[in-house]
Structure formats: C-alpha cells, structure tokens
Amino acid sequence: MSSEWRVLVADDEPAARRGVRQLLEPHKAFHVVGECRNGAEVLQALDGLGPDVLFLDVQMPGLGGFDVIKRRTPERMPLVVFLTAFDQHALKAFEAEALDYLVKPVSQTRFDAAIRRVTRRLASGTPVEPRLVVPTSHGATVVPIREIDWIEAADNYVKIWTGARSHLLRESLDDLERRIGGHGFVRAHRRALVRMAGVRSVASGSNGECVAALESGAMIPVSRRRRAAFARALKVAALRPGR
C-alpha cells in the first residue's frame, strides 16, 4: 500500500524520533515527511510540509508542545498525538483538542490503537470534536461540547449542565466563554452561557421577563440588555445544517 498520510515528528530526543519511525513501520499508509527538535521548527514545518498528523512532545527547548498549539491555534493544527514522558499533562492535552496522549515508553499495541483512531479520523475527514476535560474524584471525564446545554457561574467555578447532570470546573465564566464562544455559546445573562443549538424557544412572560426554553427542559432567563444579541444568535443557529 502506498503512503497516504503525511507525518511530522517533534521531539528534542533523537532516540524518541527514531522510536516513532519504528512504531510507524507496520503502518504503510503513514509516511514521515519531517522531524523537529523544538517548537520553532514545528511552526515552520507545519507551513512548509503540510502534515496530516503531528506526533508532538510536550517539553522541548524554547517553545513546548502546548506553546506551539497556542501560537498556531487548534483550528490550524493537523491531528495531534502527544508523545511524552509525563502523564500529568493529559488533561491539558485533551483541552488542546489532541486526538490522543501517549506516555513513553509506548508499546506497539498502544501505538497501534492510537493509529487506528488517527486513521478513522483522517478517513472520515471530520475535525477533532471540541470537548472539555473536567477533573473528577476518580480522574477526569471528557464532555463533548455538543452535549452541553448551558453553563452557569458558581463563584470561582463554572457548573456545566448536560441534561440533568452537572460538572464542576475550576474556571471563570469569562475565561470559558473565550475558549468556547466560537462553538455556538452565547451569554443569556451575566452568569449563564447557553448553547444556541439546544434552544427550543424564547418567550416573554406577562411581567416582561424573557426566558429561553432548552431542549433539555431547562429554563434560562435572558437579560434585557442581551436579548437582541441572543435573538440574532438564535436565528444564525437555526440556519445551520443538522440543528
């Protein structure tokens, strides 16, 4: 089978880069088009080589893996598989929309599983689904953004509602809005973000209060000063396919 997918390997250790090549050897549809030793080289190679997949180390001289994604932005990255000796960065990796997170030393079996995920994603042509990673008492849970109904401020936290369930995340509502506002979330009032695709209707009560009824059954007040922007966003959401 001829090479089909272009791979870029970024790691400051030559042995680690050779290891990725060896692990990729059974997967003839993947071809390594370049290797990088640091984040600056990665940024240059992304433009020059146009890889489909990037195996990215977390800690490199100068710019690390997360710095690369921050500068490039997740929307302009190829599929990213983190490959690192540190397991404590897994939550941050999934927040950065990485497809997988491999901890060195990686077995062939674990690597093959990652490649199967990469292959399915590349073959489907669909981007990595945006999601939030929420710490729990047992580790963490991944919440796809499309499953979130609304989010409310709770002191130094936010409460993320998916149906009748809620998840607590230590982040301000302002910071979270900056991260996911581009995925169809709009402020209903000072302390609430609503996913517009999940709004069933908006109605005004006899007392003049405006309320958004969500598909989940939640009723979210819409403040007076945000009503016009909320209504415009709802019209845009209604025009999107698959709503």
Image: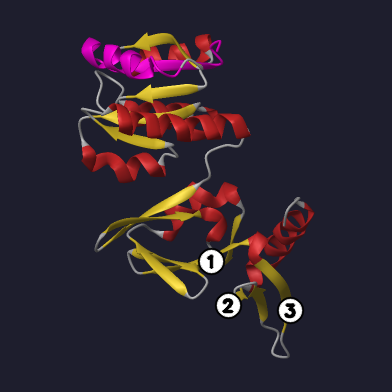
Quadrant of the image for the C terminus?
bottom right
Task: Find residue 150 and name its label.
Answer: 1
Q: Are marks 2 and 1 in contact (CB under 8 Å)?
A: yes
Q: Which of marks 3 and 2 is nearer the N terminus?
A: 3
Q: Does the magenta stretch include residue 121?
A: no
Instruction: Give 221 or 44, whichever is nearer the viewer.
Output: 44
| Distance from the alpha carbon under mark 2 to that under mark 1 | 9 Å
Residues rendered magenta in the picture? 1-27
* SS for callout 2: loop
Task: Find residue 203 and name its label.
Answer: 3
Residue 23 place in picture, x, y as percent: 33, 19
Quadrant of the image for the N terminus?
top right
* SS for callout 3: strand
Q: Which of marks 2 and 1 is nearer the N terminus?
A: 1
| Label 1 neighbour load within 10 Å: few <14, some 14-19, many 20+ | many
Instruction: Give 226 or 231, whichever is nearer the viewer.
Output: 231
Q: Earlier in the sequence, mark 3 or mark 1?
A: 1
